[in-house]
């Protein structure tokens, strides 16, 4: 039995984050995205969200960042954003609401 294939779905916020990166940084992100596509459950899950929300550690231009993604349904992985590590995920709920991935 083969493993399910996951589809990566970038949000508008994620695409804006990617556009501002250098070519070298984009290559680092691309490698992480391949790992997510193979097995999105391999990285750390964030608590406090209704849907499985995960983060991937990356170091871009000597700054600690996190790729945030949500596994929603139908083997789709929504790439939410790239956050600075130093803000302790304070903007994450705002990004999830903006992209329609959580409701209150």
Image (cartoon, grey):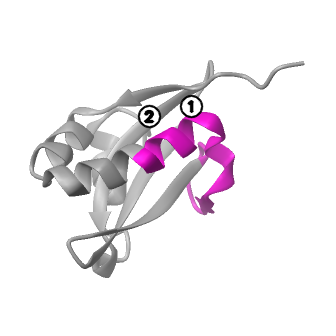
Numbered disc 1: secondary structure? loop
Q: Position of residue 88 (x, y in %)?
A: 37, 76
Q: Position of residue 42 (x, y in %)?
A: 67, 53
Please give the residue where the numbered disc 2 appears in the rendered image.
Answer: 78
Question: Can you say which quadrant of the picture contains the C terminus?
Answer: top left
Q: Which residue is drawn at the image coordinates 36% and 43% (left, top)?
A: 80
* Spatial separation of the CA atoms under disc 2 and disc 1: 7 Å
Q: Which residue is drawn at the image coordinates 61% and 62% (left, top)?
A: 44
Please give the residue where the numbered disc 1 appears in the rendered image.
Answer: 72
**Residue 43 lies in the magenta-colored region:** yes
Q: Which residue is drawn at the image coordinates 30% and 49% (left, top)?
A: 27
Using a 10 Å C-alpha cutoff, classify the residue at mark 2 as few (fewer than 14 neighbours), some (14 to 19) or many (20 or more): many
**Count of numbered circles on the image:** 2
Q: Nearer the viewer, residue 2 or 74?
A: 2
Q: Position of residue 8 (x, y in %)?
A: 46, 28
Q: Quadrant of residue 66?
A: bottom left
Magenta-colored span: 31-52
Numbered disc 2: secondary structure? strand
Q: Is residue 84 above or below residue 32?
A: below
């Amino acid at each position: 039995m083969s493993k399910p294939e996951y589809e990566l779905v970038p949000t508008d916020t994620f695409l804006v984050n990617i556009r501002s990166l250098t070519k070298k940084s984009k290559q680092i992100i691309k490698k992480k995205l391949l790992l997510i596509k193979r097995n999105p459950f391999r990285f750390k899950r964030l608590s406090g969200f209704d849907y499985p929300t995960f983060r991937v550690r990356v170091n871009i231009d000597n700054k600690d960042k996190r790729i945030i993604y949500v596994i929603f349904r139908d083997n789709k992985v929504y790439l939410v954003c790239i956050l600075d590590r130093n803000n302790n995920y304070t903007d994450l709920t705002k990004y999830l609401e903006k992209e329609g991935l959580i409701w209150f």
